């Protein structure tokens, strides 16, 4: 349903793939990723701009930019 889709690409975080290495935390310029106990992370969608800087930092491929801008 197109009405429920965001109009811009979004960051997807797959927590089941996350190994807890925390390599995504220091690359986030907006501090939208915070470590939790147990090695997982919390993503603050209000702070996240969807820049995708954390995607290549994640060796477990738990982060991915979904969607694309079209004209």
Image (cartoon, rainbow, N blue to C red):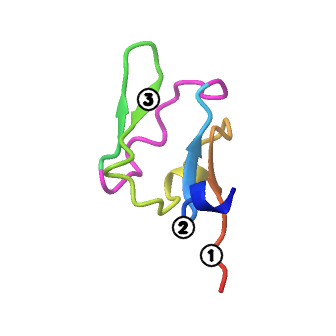
Indicate the position of residue 39 as horizontal and vertical percent values.
Answer: 46, 19
Q: Which residue is mark 1?
A: 69
In the displayed structure, 61 sits above or below 42; it is below
Q: Quadrant of the C terminus?
A: bottom right
Query: Residue at 45% of width from left, 13% of height from top?
Result: 38
Specify whether residue 67 is painted magenta: no
Of residues 26 and 67, which is closer to you in this image? 67
Which quadrant of the structure image shows residue 16? top right
Circle nearer the N terminus (1, 3): 3
Q: Which mark is residue 41?
A: 3
Q: Which residue is mark 2?
A: 8
Indicate the position of residue 15 as horizontal and vertical percent values.
Answer: 58, 28
Q: Quadrant of the N terminus?
A: bottom right
| Label 1 with label 2: CB-CB less than 8 Å | yes
Side of 64 where 20 appears, left or right: left
**Mark 3 burial class by Cα count in 10 Å: few <14, some 14-19, many 20+:** many
**Mark 2 burial class by Cα count in 10 Å: few <14, some 14-19, many 20+:** few
Magenta stretch: give its range.
16-30
Indicate the position of residue 37 as horizontal and vertical percent values.
Answer: 38, 14
Q: CA distance from mark 1 to mark 2?
A: 6 Å
Instruction: Tell me the element at label 3.
Output: strand
Specify whether residue 23 is painted magenta: yes
**Mark 1 burial class by Cα count in 10 Å: few <14, some 14-19, many 20+:** few
Instruction: Tell me the element at label 2.
Output: loop
Which quadrant of the structure image shows residue 5? bottom right
Q: Nearer the viewer, mark 3 or mark 2?
A: 2
Side of 29 where 64 appears, left or right: right
């Amino acid at each position: 349903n197109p009405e429920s889709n965001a109009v811009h690409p979004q960051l997807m975080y797959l927590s089941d793939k996350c190994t807890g290495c925390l390599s995504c935390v220091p690359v986030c310029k907006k501090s939208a990723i915070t470590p939790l106990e147990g090695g997982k992370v919390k993503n603050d969608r209000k702070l996240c701009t969807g820049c995708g800087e954390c995607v290549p930092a994640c060796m477990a491929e738990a982060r991915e930019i979904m969607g694309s801008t079209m004209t």
